[in-house]
Image (spheres, rainbow, N blue to C red):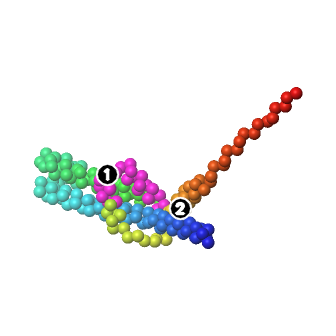
Amino acid sequence: MTGFIGRWLSDSIRFGLGLMLALAAMQVPALTNAYTAALLQISEDARRDITQRKEVARQYYRWADVTSDSAAIDALRPVEPANAEALAVSVAREQVLRGTHDRLMALPALLRPIQAAWDMLSDGRADKRAVLRTAIDTHAPQIVISMAAAIYGLAGLTLGLLLAQLLLALPRALWHRRGRRPALARPERRTPVLRA
């Protein structure tokens, strides 16, 4: 009876941990999609703000030939250096967010989470971290049936089963070690010496 309960308990732990990590891994592609959508939305908002600020400056100073971002920044520097610097920061931020979005969308859905994680580790700017936090906060767990979700789910299941096996192997090893008693030392047998 004890063996039956032990097997049932170990199978339940394996199944539960494997299923939990499989479902968690299936969220990775959906979370990456939320992250790329947030990158696009924030970069478009930044672009609208930049365009509006350039238009206000162009009308105020009556600049006819100022259309590009760099031309607007150069034209503002002599008259409003603080605004020129703020505009340059906004342009750089918009370019970084848009570039990250474009790089992610150029990849297949299976590779986007890996690229997003690598991009976050190699270039962890505060803007990107804020976008990721927003994506995580607004993400609603869901089961999306797609090739990427299935592959990530299978990887999570495999990892969960491996972790469960390691988790269960540790108490077994300790139990067997404790249960094994050291063998009693036998007295050393001496070979009799024959004397002539």
Label 2 element class: helix
At horizontal 16% and vertical 51% (from top left) the residue drawn is: 83
Q: Is residue 139 magenta?
A: no
**Which stretch is magenta?**
109-132
Mark 2 is surrounded, within 10 Å at the Cα level, by few (under 14), some (14 to 19) or many (20 or more) other residues, namely many
* 91 or 156: nearer the viewer: 156
At horizontal 40% and vertical 62% (from top left) the residue drawn is: 32
Q: Main secondary structure of the magenta part?
A: helix
| Res. 29 in view | no
Label 1 element class: loop
At horizontal 22% and vertical 57% (from top left) the residue drawn is: 50
For residue 52, which quarter of the picture?
A: bottom left
x, y (%) of residue 80? 13, 49
x, y (%) of residue 55? 18, 59
Which amino acid does the dot numbered 1 rest on? Answer: Arg
x, y (%) of residue 39? 33, 60
Residue that label 1 marks: 125
| Gap between marks 1 and 2 measured at Cα | 36 Å
Q: Is residue 121 magenta?
A: yes
Compared across the picture, whether 10 is left or right of 103 comes to: right
Which amino acid does the dot numbered 2 rest on? Answer: Ala
Q: Which mark is residue 192?
A: none
For residue 132, which quarter of the picture?
A: bottom left
For residue 190, which quarter of the picture?
A: top right
Residue that label 2 marks: 164
Quadrant in the picture for the C terminus:
top right
Quadrant in the picture for the N terminus:
bottom right
* 20 or 119: nearer the viewer: 20
* 184 or 71: nearer the viewer: 184
Mark toward the start of the polypeptide (1 vs 2): 1
Mark 1 is surrounded, within 10 Å at the Cα level, by few (under 14), some (14 to 19) or many (20 or more) other residues, namely few
